Amino acid sequence: MKVKNGRETITAKIAYIAGFFDGEGCVRLKQSNQNESSYYVIAHITNTNQMILEQVQDLFGGTIRMQEKGVNKTIFNWQITSSEAADFLTTISPFLQEKKTQALLAIKFHSQKGTLKPDERVSWARVMSEMKKFPGGNIYENPELLTK
């Protein structure tokens, strides 16, 4: 952790957010409502602690939604999409552990989506969905995901 004059630097905050995202976050490709062969990157964090999500929003943007869950329980969902999500993932990826491979795939998808054919976009979305079945797994350790 970088510390300057006894105060946290932005690197420490980003590392903390990356760890928080590793435990409480999700990265995926979401199908567009307007076009079934169109997908975009979405990253979100769900938690009961609104304050940490506001800190994430202050640094990266995105939106926070509140949701009532059961009796006397409120949860908050921060999310960011498309280019902003790719930027967020690029920034935190050096600090990620469990979701690093998913983040790198989402970043790569975002940078290539304009050149992908519709069936290739669907294939990427399937791979990202399958990644959830291998928490912390590495796509290179599971090459069969690339052929589905």
Image (tube, helix red, strand yellow):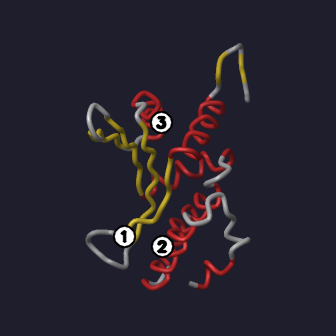
Residue at point 61%, 85% (across, down): 147
Q: Please tell me whether mark 2 sits on a helix, a strand or a loop.
A: helix
Q: Position of residue 81 (x, y in %)?
A: 41, 55
* Horizontal and vertical percent position of residue 14: 60, 36
How crowded pointer 3 is (Cα within 10 Å; few <14, some 14-19, many 20+) is rated as many
* Residue 30, horizontal then vertical, whole percent: 40, 65
Indicate which disc, 1 or 3, sits on the residue closer to the N terminus.
1
Q: Is residue 27 above or below residue 69?
A: below
Please give left or right for residue 2 compared with residue 38 in the image: right
Is the C-beta separation of discs 2 and 1 under 8 Å?
yes
- The amino acid sitting under disc 1 is Gln
Decide which of 116, 148 is in the foreground and name it: 148
* Viewer-closest of 111 and 70: 70
Q: Which of disc 2 and disc 3 is earlier in sequence?
A: 3
Instruction: Count every numbered label the image shows and give the total.
Output: 3
**Residue topped by disc 2:** 125
* Residue at figure coordinates x 47%, y 78% from the top left: 121
First reached walking from the N terminus: tag 2 or tag 1: 1
Mark-to-mark CA distance, 2 and 1: 8 Å
Q: Quadrant of the N terminus?
A: top right
- Three-letter residue code for mark 3: Val
Q: Nearer the viewer, residue 30 or 138?
A: 138
Amino acid type at circle 2 is Ala
Q: Identify the residue at horizontal 70%, vertical 14% (top origin).
A: 6
The relative height of residue 102 versus residue 12 in the rendered view (above or below) is below
User: Residue at coordinates 53% horizontally, 51% vertically from top-left?
Assistant: 87
Disc 3 marks which residue?
Answer: 56
Marks 1 and 3 close (CB-CB < 8 Å): no
Q: Residues within 10 Å of mark 2 (few under 14, many from 20)?
A: many
Label 1, on which residue?
Answer: 31
- The answer to whether mark 3 and mark 2 are in CB contact below 8 A is no
Left or right of residue 116, residue 10 in this image: right
